[in-house]
Amino acid sequence: MAHLDRIFHSLADSTRRAVIAQLAIGPASISDLAQRHHMALPSFMKHIRVLEQSDIVVSRKSGRVRMCELRPESLKTAQGWLESERRTWETRLNQLDTFVENLAAKDNADGNR
């Protein structure tokens, strides 16, 4: 569950979501990623570290350039959890619908007597 918590923490910030969207197009350098955000580089690097700690992003240094790459497979943990929750709530809502329909049918039957 700690890994899932890190993923959702990473996704909770709009800057990090924007970086993920940028990297979905393809790998990019830190400087290219940072240039689209209005913040100091050290502040931006904190966002990159959070993404790396959750394994959503991996970065590698090549010479003087640090390149970042998206690891979309790491998001499958969050996707699986969300899908499980969706199924649970769909089942609960279907049960509630059935209960309400049965209650309404019973009230109609009692009213017709």
Image (cartoon, helix red, strand yellow):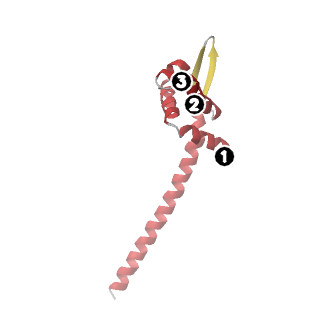
Q: Secondary structure at mark 2?
A: helix
Quick one: 96 or 20, which is closer to the camera? 20
What's the amino acid at mark 3? Ala
Q: Secondary structure at mark 3?
A: loop
Give the mark nearer the N terminus: 1 vs 2.
1
Q: Residue 79 appears at what percent x and percent y?
A: 55, 43
Residue at numbered disc 3: 40
Q: Residue 111 appears at what percent x and percent y?
A: 34, 85
Quick one: 41 or 70, which is closer to the camera? 41
Residue at numbered disc 2: 47
Give the mark nearer the N terminus: 1 vs 3.
1
**Residue 70 visible in the snapshot:** no
The residue shown at (49%, 57%) is 90
The residue shown at (38%, 77%) is 105
Quick one: 30 or 77, which is closer to the camera? 30
Residue at numbered disc 1: 1
| Quadrant where the image shows the C terminus | bottom left
The furthest residue to the top: 63
Q: Residue 102 appears at what percent x and percent y?
A: 42, 74
Task: Give the alpha-carbon distance from disc 3 to disc 2, as whole Å.
Answer: 11 Å
Q: In the image, 5: left or right of 101?
A: right
